Image (cartoon, helix red, strand yellow):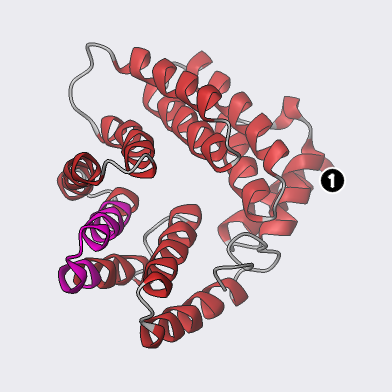
Amino acid sequence: MPVVDDLARAREAFERREWLAAYEGLSAAGDDRLFAADFANLAVSAYLVGRHNDCVQALQRAFQAHLDAGDVAAAVRSAFWLAMTLIDRGETAVAGGWIARADRLLTDREDSVEHGFILFPRMMQTIFSGQFAEGMAMAVQVTDYGRRFREPDLLAAGLMSQGRCLMYGGETRTALSLLDEAMVEVLGGEVSPVFAGQVYCSCIEACQEIADFGRVAEWTAALTRWCEAQPGLLAFTGQCA
């Protein structure tokens, strides 16, 4: 019973966004006691407390557990998060392998929000390579997936990506309007923690690049309040803050 109680407390800590308590509790529970959703939550907690290796391992277990349960959509999302985490670490080849695996799982399946998630890392790689026109077209698609499937993560990230592409193209006023709209989506509280932090950081970075220090100050204050409300959060508290 105490072990069950500890696992329940870890799950409750995750819902309260107490990331360190969630990470420690889920890690201590043991793989044989965790469901697929627990592995996914452990991955999020690990990422947010700066344990990226543990995040990758938990996502791999979540992917396999979802696949074993026949939940292809959830498995694809785990593959997506694996790709995103690996891209952050500079492991683009391995990330590409996970995107390809997710693509294979989506073969012959009707259009879904998961297709939008898998498009997102490809869009990022396109933008990182300096292909801003192509990246902009993909960002519009990501935003459309967010709107059609009412997925706050894709909507906020798509708007942010459009803004960054337009900024690199010199359309600063329109770019800032899209970045502001992305931030409104984040502040609405429906965007998941990792996407919320990434959108915050990207918008702050964009305004630093054009020396819009008024926006930098406003969004840094918002980011600080957001971070302080989540005990144990280490991600997004460095350069962005």
| Residue count near mark 1 (Cα–Cα under 10 Å), binned few <14, some 14–19, many ≥20 | few
Residue 230 on image: x %, y %: 61, 68
> Which sits in the foreground, 127 or 151?
127
Q: Is residue 1 visible?
A: no
The magenta stretch spans residue 133? no
Q: Is residue 185 left or right of residue 47?
A: left
The magenta stretch spans residue 174? yes
Residue at image point 27% right, 30% down: 115
Image quadrant where one finds the C terminus: bottom right
Image quarter for residue 142? top left
Image quadrant where one finds the N terminus: top right
- Magenta range is 155-176
Residue 79 on image: x %, y %: 48, 27
Q: Is residue 60 left or right of residue 149?
A: right
- What amino acid type should be assigned to the residue bearing mark 1? Pro
Residue at image point 17% right, 66% down: 171
Residue underneath mark 1: 2
